Amino acid sequence: MAASITVKKGEVASAINFVKDFLEENKVKDKEKVKALLMAEEVTVGLLNHSADDGSVKLAARRSFGNIIIDASAPGPEFELMSDEMIGEILDTGYETSDMGINTEGAIRNILVKSFVDQLKYKNEKGRNQVRITAVTSRYAFLYMTLTGLFAGLICGLLMSFMPDGMKQVINDNVFSLITTVFMNGLQTVVGPVVFFSIATAIAGFGNLSDIGKIGGKVMLAYILTSILSIVIGTALFFAFQPGDPAVAEGITATEVVDQETVAEMGDVSLKSTIVGLVPSNIIKPFLEANMLQIIVLAIFCGAAAGLIGQFSNLIKDLFEAMNELFLKITVILVKLIPLVTFCSMASMMLSVGGDSIVSVLGIAGVILLGFLAMMIVYCILIVLFTGLNPILFFRKYAPTMLQVFSLSSSNASIPLNMKVCGEKLGISPKIYSFSIPLGATINMNGACIQLAVSALAIAHIYGVEISGRMLVIMCATIILLSMGAPGIPGMGLILLTVILTQFNVPVEGVSLLIGIYPILDMFITMINCMGDVATTFMVAKSEKLLDVDAFNAAGN
């Protein structure tokens, strides 16, 4: 929906009526309508005052992804729409300024425009002043854009699937996969610093180090319990539906599914090896290898020590906080590209995944997705039991972030998004989420636990391998240890599954059954993983009285 009008000097009222009619047609609330009309008036007057004698201002209003945007443009020289100098003068000297030659009305307009700085964008291009007013910002705008990218990518990939294989491969490798890989590389670059500085800042902010142990203990216990619940859910659903047709085994060929060196490195999943692997041999190696557990340990040590070094404590804390803000800001900039990346990743997936592969594992995938739904219900029950708050409101506030996390398919890359929703939507204190979200992205893999349990049991069933009660207990412990030490990156579930199958002497070629459908499953896995991180953080924050209940219950957030 869009409309436009052109007004000249002396016709400001016509411009205001045009904007007012458009806002009313779109059922904008009174508070936002008054604010938008005030911005439109000040911008129109400012553009007319700086246009040629016979100049005019063109106004165009439109609705885009839930946002209501008003574009205003007029020919004329560049000027300062928001003049700090003029505002400063009028604030310093008051309104009796006519003898000083200051345009009081213009200064007042500048003050009003300055107050709306976040909703205004100004530029002068080719002798034309252009102002964009974001009259209404929809909280679902980014969600709509991401959804558009998702469905557009699916459609584009489907249409291109009829092209010759060689041409599809070239386009996929040089366009879709290229953009997706570059974006993910950018995110992975900042993930390490984000995890380190967010945790270090959170711990350094505690006045009493004993509080860290108390909160950390609650978070760890909650993560372990939800991981056990997710494995129980996956196991129960497998035995209820028995997915996996043994007849499929004959068609499975011995294919190199994943890097065997990586599998060998992860094969030792003993408690001893896990503990030894927590402490890095040098301070640089964890960042080079993206070893999140070691980065977290370093962050805990540095954050705790920051408050114990006397006169330098405040300096170090300020440095941690500044670096945390820096890398979070970089991430926010990158995240704005998510709709484009979603389009490319969906198109790439459609070009790479064959229909036969999807059909052959539909039963296994269906049980896994059912497990994800069951885990969401468990989150609802836990939220009611431990907070007494409305779980539906929780999911409604987290819903826009869910799709963004879904498209990223990476728990680590989703850390900034989850921390943002914790602070801005759910009312959780930074003391909690700055610590628990990065930690959860590394050790809390509820979605992966469900997928691993169902997949391992299903593939064992296909090959006729009987899983005893003792083996189920070992599988549960193995999955927990593997998930705690595995990086939250796309595709890691296939490597973890290979490790589990190797331990139970199940042919690892069975992993190839999931290759075709795994890109889709991986997105759901990430979504459930991250939902578990946020739900756990929410519950711990409530128990520690670090949850702003009024902010959580506030409408419109």
Image: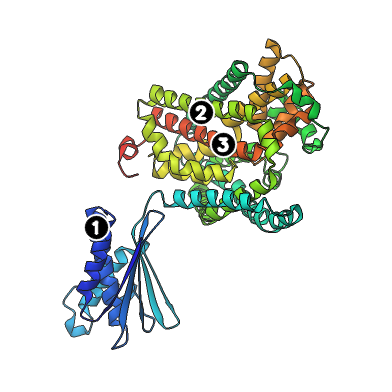
Residue bearing the label numbered 1: 24
Asked if residue 160 lies left or right of residue 112, the reply is right
Q: Mark 1: which amino acid?
A: Glu
Q: Distance between the Cα atoms at labels 1 and 2? A: 40 Å
Residue bearing the label numbered 2: 373
Q: Position of residue 67 (x, y in %)?
A: 37, 56
Question: From the viewer's perspective, is residue 281 above or below residue 10?
Answer: above
**Mark 1 touching mark 2, by CB under 8 A?**
no
Q: Secondary structure at mark 1?
A: helix
Q: Residue furthest top?
A: 469
Labels in figure, total: 3
Work out which quarter of the rendered image holds the N terminus and state it: bottom left
Q: Distance between the Cα atoms at labels 3 and 1? A: 39 Å
Q: Mark 2: which amino acid?
A: Leu
Q: Secondary structure at mark 3?
A: helix
For the point 58% across and 20% down, the residue is 237
For the point 60% across and 51% down, the residue is 187
Asked if residue 320 lies left or right of residue 118, the reply is right
Q: Distance between the Cα atoms at labels 3 and 2? A: 10 Å
For the point 40% across and 80% down, the residue is 128
Q: Position of residue 212 (x, y in %)?
A: 49, 32
Residue bearing the label numbered 3: 524
Q: Residue furthest right?
A: 254
Q: Residues within 10 Å of mark 2 (few under 14, many from 20)?
A: few
User: Mark 1 or mark 3, which is nearer the start of the sequence?
Assistant: 1
Question: From the viewer's perspective, is residue 488 above or below residue 497?
Answer: below
Q: Mark 3: which amino acid?
A: Phe
Q: Secondary structure at mark 2?
A: helix
